Amino acid sequence: MSRYLFLFFLLVAAALAQAQKPALVPRKPTAAPKAKPQTEQPATVAAAPPLTLAQAIQIGLENNFDIRLARTDEQVAANNVTRGNAGQLPVVDGNLTRTFNRNNVRQESSSRPEPSIANNAQSNLLNANVAATWTIFDGLGMFVAYDRLKALNQSQRQLTRATLEETVANITDAYYAVVRESGKIKSIEEALKIGQARIDLTQGRVDVGVSAKVEVLTARVDYNADQSALIQQQELLTTAKITLNNLLGRTPRLDFSPADSIVVTRDLDQAAITQGIQQNNPRLQLAKTNTDVATYDRRLVRASRFPQVGLTSGYGLNRNVNGAAFFGNQLVTNTGRTYGLNYGVVASVPIFDGFNRNRLEQNARIVEEQSQLQLGQTQLQIEADAQQAYAQYQNRLRLLELEETNILLARENVAIALERYRLGLLTPIVLREAQRTQLDAEVRLLDIRFQAKQAETVLRRLSGGLVQ
C-alpha cells in the first residue's frame, strides 16, 4: 500500500513541475538583421542640427585660422612682386628745408673806433629740390631680383595650398571620427536593448520559479556595465565634436549631428596616385620652388661683382636771406637765390671688400646644394608616405569586406541566441558572449571603415586631389 502512495505523490510532483514550465510556442525563424545606416541619430544623444562633410569643409575654408593666416602671407608675397621692389624703376624724392635764425652780431674793424653791434638779427634759409636716381645697370641683378620675387610668390602659393590640403584632410578625419563615435553609441544602444530583453526574460523565469534570482542580478550587472560603456562613449563623441569645431574655427560647444556616413572608395589606382604626386603635390612643388629661390640668391651675389651705373637728375631752389651783415656802421640785409636743373651719371665699381663677396657666393652655393638635398628628402618622404598609406588602404579594404560579412553573422547569431534563451535552451553566459561578440564586431567594423577612409584621405592629399 505504501508503495502505491509513493508512486501517486511522484506523479503529482511531476505534473506540478511540468505546469510551472513556460509553454513552448512555435515561432517563425528569425531573419538576419540588416545593418542600420550610420547617419541614424543615437537615441541617447540629444537632437542637433545636421552637418554634412561638404558643409564642414566649406566652413573650415572660410574660418580656419591656419588657412586665413596662410592667405594673408600669400597676399603679402603677391604685393611684393613689383618692378620697383626689384630696383628696376627710378626713385624720385622731394626735399624741403626752411630754417630761421636770430643772432647777436658784434663786428670790430681797425677803421672804426667803435664796434658795430646788432642784437637779435634775423636771417632765414629756404632750400627745396626734387632729385631722381635711376639704376640702369647693376650686373642684371634687378632682373634676377624680379624673378626671385615671383618665385617667392609661387612658393607662398604652394605653401597656402599645402595648408589647405592638410587642413581639409584634418577636417575630413575629424568629421568621420564623429561619425565613428556616433556609430559606436548606436552599437552600445543595441547591446542595451538585448540586455534589457535578457533581464525581462530572466525576471519572468524567476517569477514562475524556473530560474534563480542570481541570474537576474547577473543580467543587471552586465546591463550596468554596458551603460557605463555608453557614458564613456558619449564623452568620446563630445571630444570628437570639440576637435572638429576647433578645426572649423567656431565655438567648441556648438552641437551638431553628422549627416554623412563613411563611404570608402575602393578603386584608387596606385599609378594615378604616383603621377598626381609628381605633378600636384604642393609640398613637393614647394621644395622645387625653394631650389629656384636659392639659385636666384646665388646669381644676385654674383651680380654684385659688376659695376653699377645710374642716372641722376634734379631741380632745386636755394634762397638765403641774411640780416646780419654790416655796411659800414649800418646793418643791411642780403638776399641770395639760386635755382636750376642738375643732371649727371653715377657709377661705382667694387674693387675690394675684404673678400666678403667670395664668402657670400660660397654660402649661396652651399644653400643651393642644401635646397637640392631637401628636395630629394621631401620627394622620398612623400613617396614613402604614399606607399605606406596605399598598403594600409589595400589591407583595410580586405578587412572591411571580411568584417561586413562578419557583422551580419554576429547579428544573426545574437538573434538566434536570444530566441534560444527565451525558450530556455541557452545559458545566460552564452547569450552574454554572443552579445559581446556582436558589439566587438560592430566596433571593429567602424574602426576599420574609419581607418580605410583615413588611408584614402592621405592618398588624395598626397596626390593633390583633395582640394580642387
Image: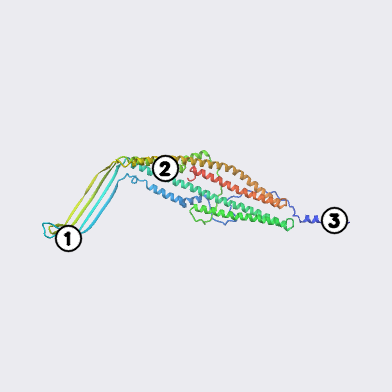
- Residue 290 tag number: 2
- Residue 6 tag number: 3
> Which callout, 1 or 3, points at the residue further toward the start of the chain?
3
Q: Position of residue 83 (x, y in %)?
A: 34, 45
- Location of mark 1 (residue): 118
What amino acid is at disc 2? Asn
Q: Position of residue 218 (x, y in %)?
A: 68, 55
Q: Is residue 332 above or below residue 156?
A: below
In three-dimensional space, the C-alpha distance between marks 1 and 2, rounded to whole angstroms, equals: 71 Å
Q: Are marks 2 and 3 in contact (CB under 8 Å)?
A: no
Residue lying furthest right in this view?
1
Front in this rendered view, residue 24 or 340 = 340
> Which callout, 1 or 2, points at the residue further toward the start of the chain?
1
Quadrant of the frame with the N terminus? bottom right
In three-dimensional space, the C-alpha distance between marks 2 and 3, rounded to whole angstroms, equals: 104 Å
What amino acid is at disc 3? Phe
- In the picture, measured across the screen, residue 343 lies left or right of residue 283, that is left
Is disc 1 surrounded by few (<14), some (14 to 19) or many (20+) residues within 10 Å?
A: some
In three-dimensional space, the C-alpha distance between marks 1 and 3, rounded to whole angstroms, equals: 157 Å
Is disc 2 surrounded by few (<14), some (14 to 19) or many (20+) residues within 10 Å?
A: many
Secondary structure under badge 1?
Answer: strand
Is disc 3 surrounded by few (<14), some (14 to 19) or many (20+) residues within 10 Å?
A: few
- In the picture, measured across the screen, residue 236 lies left or right of residue 165, that is right
